[in-house]
Amino acid sequence: MKELLRTTDPTIIAFATALLEGEGITAFELDVHMSILDGGLGILPRRLMVADRDLFLARAILRDNGVEYAQ
């Protein structure tokens, strides 16, 4: 799996996941429960991962919809 996106904004994660699922790409969110460690402040970023084979297409989908992704 490759990191596609890293952000502290849960709405961007939800939007990106919906875009990818609409194109048949499975995305997996990591670090969801890390907010327990920061007291719910949302200072620890979440990561959105995709399979290696889907990375190129996933980046193109996010780019076409104005979502910045990890390089």
Image: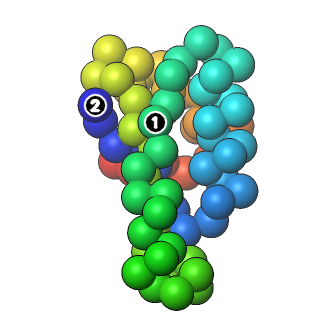
Would you say 58 lies left or right of 4 here? Answer: right
Quadrant (top left/top right/bottom left/bottom right) for the N terminus: top left
Residue picked out by circle 1: 28
Kind of residue at badge 1: Phe
Q: Residue at x 59, y 12 (%)?
A: 24
Q: How many marks?
A: 2
- Towards the viewer: 36 or 58: 36
At which x and y percent is residue 29? 47, 44
Q: Amino acid at mark 2?
A: Met
Where disc 1 sits, the SS reads strand
- Residue 15 is left or right of residue 8, and the answer is right
Whether pointer 2 and pointer 1 mark residues with C-beta atoms closer than 8 Å, the reply is yes
Residue 55 percent coordinates (x, y): 38, 26
Q: Position of residue 39 (x, y in %)?
A: 52, 87
Q: Is residue 6 above or below residue 26?
A: below
Residue 51 figure quarter: top left
Q: Dot 2, crowdedness within 10 Å: few (<14), some or many (≥20)?
A: few
Residue at 64% in and 60% down: 10
Position of residue 22 relative to residue 11, above or below, is above
27 is higher (above) or lower (below) than 26: below
**Residue 32: image location, x then y, percent:** 49, 58
Instruction: Say which residue label 2 marks.
Output: 1
- Helix, strand or loop at label 2? It is loop
| Earlier sequence position, callout 2 versus callout 1 | 2
